[in-house]
Amino acid sequence: MKKRVLNFVVVAGVTLGSVACKDDKSNKVEPGEAQEAAVATEEAVTYEIDTTASTIEWRGTKPTGEHKGTIAIQDGTLSATQEEITSGSVTIDMNSIEVTDEGMDDKDRTSLENHLKGTVEGKETDFFNVKEYPTASFEITGVTEENGQKMLQGNLTLKDSTKNIQFPVSTDIDEEEITLESETFTIDRTNWGVNYGSKSVFDNLGDNFISDEMELTIKVTAKRAQ
């Protein structure tokens, strides 16, 4: 079976969460060097990701509040046996970054979305710079189990940086469909060069900083390829 790459990311989150500033340490990711992508086994079946039923949710915080939203999955595939996902790739559409804060004024919402995307003149490189980096990616490198919890491992590429991460997931696999949902986990956006408003990078920000840590939750549905 053809090797695929899980092209995946986030937030201001997909690193989108970068707009965040809360110090939630639960399921905190410790990134490592990029690893070799997993290769589908001969008995594995290919499933195509249903982009209409899949999404990435992000949440970010700062001293004055928080923001949350979604990023769409552009395309991707998963390969799996009856028991386990063996490989896969997902591409994330960074132009799809949305802010979903309740009660937010439409003008403010659009302004924040554009800032995260980097479509505001003079602020292109603050966050995700979608003109230069229109997609993010995640490629599966393995699946393990820790203390009875399934952990998905993969290379997360945001902008021009790739790091290997792992996070807890639950999966349901049958002949026609795979569903995968992660627990909420956090990444440090500065590991991928998203440094805007980071007090670990810049001095004298006072309370005008944005948390380095962003929360992500991934929900994927994939249908058996025809």
Image (tube, rainbow, N blue to C red):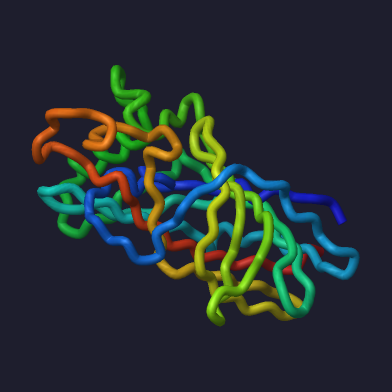
Residue positioned 9% across, 36% down in the render: 206
Q: Position of residue 87 (x, y in %)?
A: 73, 59
Q: Nearer the viewer, residue 197 or 201?
A: 201
Of 102 and 198, nearer the camera is: 198
* Quadrant of the drawing holding the N terminus: bottom right
Frontmost residue, 92 versus 199: 199
Residue 107 visible in the picture? no
Residue drawn at 50 percent across, 39 percent down: 158
Question: Left of 159 or right of it: where is 198?
Answer: left
Quick one: which residue is furthest to the top in this view? 122
Question: Can residue 84 be seen here?
Answer: yes
Asked whether, in this view, residue 102 is left or right of residue 83, the answer is left
Count of number-bearing discs? 0
Q: Quadrant of the C terminus?
A: bottom right
Residue in the picture at 60% in, 59% down: 153
Q: For the view shown, which residue lies furthest in the right direction?
A: 42
Residue 23 position within the rendered picture, expressed as x and y whole percent measured from the top left: 24, 56
Q: Position of residue 219 (x, y in %)?
A: 50, 65
Q: Residue at x 33, y 37 (%)?
A: 116
Q: Is residue 93 left or right of residue 143?
A: left
> Residue 45 in the image: x percent, y percent?
81, 67
Q: Is residue 132 above or below residue 19?
A: above
Q: Is residue 133 above or below residue 50?
A: above
